[in-house]
Amino acid sequence: MGREKLSEKKLIVMLKISNITKSFDGFFALDDVSLFVDQGVIHAVIGPNGAGKTTFFNIISGILAPDNGSVYFKGQNLAKIEPHKIVQLGIARSFQRVNIFPRKTVFENIQIALIARDQLHRSPFKKASNLFSEEVEELLKVVNLFEQVELRGGDLSHGMQKQLELAIALASQPKILLLDEPTAGMSLSETQSCIKLLKNIVQDRALTLLFTEHDMQVVFGMADYISVLHHGRLIASGPPSKIRENSEVKRVYLGNKAL
Amino acid sequence: MPFYVRKNFWTITALALLAILPLTGSRYSIDLTTQVLIYALFALSLNILVGYLGNLSFGHAAFFSIGGYTCAILLTTYNFPFLISFLTALAFSAIAAFLIGLVCVRRNHMYFAMLTLAFGMLVWAIALKWRPVTGGDDGFVGINIPTILSNPINFYYFTLLTSIIATYALWTICNSTFGQAMIAIRENQNRALFLGIDTQSIRLKAFVISGIFAGLSGILFALYNRGMYPESAFWTESGQVLIMVLLGGMHSFIGPILGAIALYSLEIFINQFTEYWQIVLGGILLIVVLIAPEGLAGGVIWVEKNFLKKS
Ligand SMILES: Nc1ncnc2c1ncn2[C@@H]1O[C@H](COP(=O)(O)OP(=O)(O)O)[C@@H](O)[C@H]1O
Ligand SMILES: [Mg+2]
């Protein structure tokens, strides 16, 4: 459905990833991976553990340099651009393992993201207290954490910490959001509400979303487009209906179970 | 009481007491307080690195002594006017902190700490061996200070005023958006980076700020003692100010001030009875680390919470 809807608009390529190869001590975590992420699309990257999904994200966000290949964001080559500058360009991410400021309050967790977005973190004379309080409030309402505003990040439940990290990523007003297993470790009900939330957010903000996920229900219920990694290779890429039918995907990843 | 006064009750009380201290006419308390003010500023400057940025430094005496020696040499050897010597000494501390910081902030944790220690030793060795300029192990004595500052009461007020301005500046910095960025780096450097914060440049900036204020306290120290000695650059000096920070509480702005007051007074007190100050110092450090990691400031907060419930 996403494709049809999108094809009415002119497709703009957000991310163009070409022939990415990355090896660790001779082991190929990514092997000649190429894909496009179109603007406004919810794009899932799936694959079993160790398929190379996180490595793929780490290359896009500048943590790792690829051995080969290139990443273009809206026509700009990201090679040699430092991670914090990549964020400033409009690529925000979350991490598979919760990555927040555990001893800052929920409020401060979001506030620092807003400070960074507006490049105010360099100003030694700009008073911080109460800065952005309205915007923080809004973001916390979006992820249902408003009640927890005064708690410390580390005192939240795991699911809430994931939500908090999502809000942190949203705070930087990215053009594309990279979420590495946004529902990892969540209970079933938490997962479902998180997915609903994500869908709404992406729609409301006209975001482009690139995410990895292990739960197939989630992926097929949500993605406009799916890319399948296996042993570092891209074995299939297309809309959910195509992926469902793809025999290689069925064989290597889905264990022939009907989807 | 007006709101402003109520909110800042302790600060205002402390400042009032400091302002009228010379009325007691006690030379001893004037001298002691001057020294405590100088160390409090030194400790506050270190806490930018240790408490706010989360980087342990074992070489902070380097900037203290660069400030002190530079001011001493310019005033005395070159007969520069006071203000120029003072400002140039600050600038030298800043430049030294920038250059040393460039190397140190490339590393984290242990390696950062070891680099600061190494640079601290280097500065100490220069102070000790560059005899024609620094006076070597005899120290640089007989600093040519302005006559107006040679009166202890005047010098006390000069130190008090300088400390107040510097403390206010540090307080502003710590409570700024930049201060929040430092705390973010302390709490999770990786996440800070992926908010779009250039963590290395924030760390370098913090290093320079910290170095400037350490230099300032070193200048006051040199003027007060009318001399500067290589011991002030030795790593034990860096260790002592670090203990002040830990004792006072590194996660509170005011902690290092409390630590400086407590440790300095205690040292003078203990030294009257025994030569084994180091044993006491070690004991204090043990207690802080094992029992009260938030230091005296943590204790104050605890008392306030449990006994002085706000109405
Ligand atoms: N920094 C690294 N050093 C060595 N091997 C790594 C490193 N990062 C990932 N790998 C390896 O690369 C493969 C892909 O890992 P990863 O990208 O985390 O997979 P996924 O996220 O799909 O589970 C795994 O076999 C992993 O062990
Ligand atoms: Mg992964």
Image: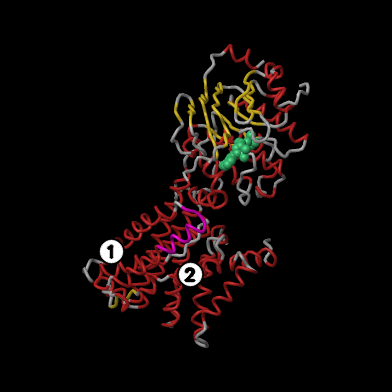
| Numbered disc 2: secondary structure | helix
| Numbered disc 1: secondary structure | helix
Query: Residue A222, position in %: x, y?
Result: 69, 24
Q: For the point 37% across and 64% down, which residue is it?
A: B215
Q: Is residue A1 above or below residue A127?
A: above
Image colouring? secondary structure
Q: For the point 49% across and 27% down, which residue is it?
A: A73
The numbered mark at residue A53 is none
Label 2: which residue?
B239
Residue sitting farthest toward the front: A26
Crowding at dot 2, Cα within 10 Å, few <14 / some 14-19 / many 20+, comes out as: some
Give the number of callouts. 2
Q: Is residue A29 left or right of residue B39?
A: right
**Quarter of the rendering containing residue B190:** top right
Query: Residue B260, position in %: x, y?
Result: 50, 71
The foreground one among A77 and B33 is A77
Question: Which chain does the residue under circle 2 lie in?
Answer: B
Q: Which residues are magenta?
A: B107-118
Q: For the point 54% across and 58% down, which residue is it?
A: B4
Label 1: which residue?
B83
Mark 1 residue type: Leu
Residue A43 on the magenta span: no
